[in-house]
Amino acid sequence: IRVKTKWHKGGKQRDPKHFVELAEQYALRSEWRTAALFYKKAWDRGHDAKYLVSMGDALLADGEVGRALQSLNQALINQPDLIDGHVRKLDLSMELAQLYGTADDWQRVRETAEAFLDSKGTVSPEQQASARHAKGLAIVRPSAANPSDLDAGEAELRQAMELAPDRV
């Protein structure tokens, strides 16, 4: 795909926002793979982890689940307090665990929820409730529940209900 871009002296793109604009234009047309490419170019020039989250969203919309997870992981490595990254990764991890239900999937949910809860970003009560709910489910899931973990899982689920009873 050839796209006309704005260049300045030295052949380098002047602003990553230009690539974000292109990505958004392609996303509006549901051309997810191309949108992901332009979010990657924005990341390469601006190193804003939000671009990696957007890239992950585009990859997921294109059906590239593994690559979407990689993009979200990279975003959180580069900016561990990026709440949008935690939210997207937790949502995706929960979907995969509910769909496939393997022990590894549920372990990823638990680790993702714990990382989210440990992050230094500003987490709303609803987001905290979602993370605690996910962690609780990962602990007590019927296919792999360890009887000694049931109390911990139940405690997480109770906290989630206290934080946001309408959401959980």
Image (spheres, rainbow, N blue to C red):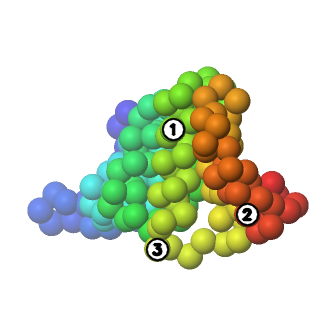
Mark 1 lies on residue:
107
Q: Is residue 103 left or right of residue 159?
A: left
Residues packed near mark 1 inside 10 Å, few (<14), some (14 to 19) or many (20 plus):
some
| Most foreground residue, 129 or 39 | 129
Quarter of the view holding residue 12: bottom left
Q: Residue at x 46, y 73 (%)?
A: 120
Residues packed near mark 2 inside 10 Å, few (<14), some (14 to 19) or many (20 plus):
some
Gap in angstroms between the C-alphas marked 3 and 1 = 22 Å
Quarter of the view holding residue 164: bottom right
* Amino acid at dot 2: Gln
Work out whether mark 3 precedes mark 1 in sequence or the reverse, and give the earlier one.
1
Mark 3 lies on residue:
120
* Amino acid at dot 3: Lys
Gap in angstroms between the C-alphas marked 1 and 2 = 20 Å
| Most foreground residue, 87 or 134 | 134
Work out whether mark 1 precedes mark 2 in sequence or the reverse, and give the earlier one.
1
Q: Position of residue 76 (x, y in %)?
A: 40, 57
Residues packed near mark 3 inside 10 Å, few (<14), some (14 to 19) or many (20 plus):
few
Q: Position of residue 122 (x, y in %)?
A: 56, 76
- In the picture, the quarter occupied by the C terminus is bottom right
Q: Is residue 134 left or right of residue 103?
A: right
Mark 2 lies on residue:
159
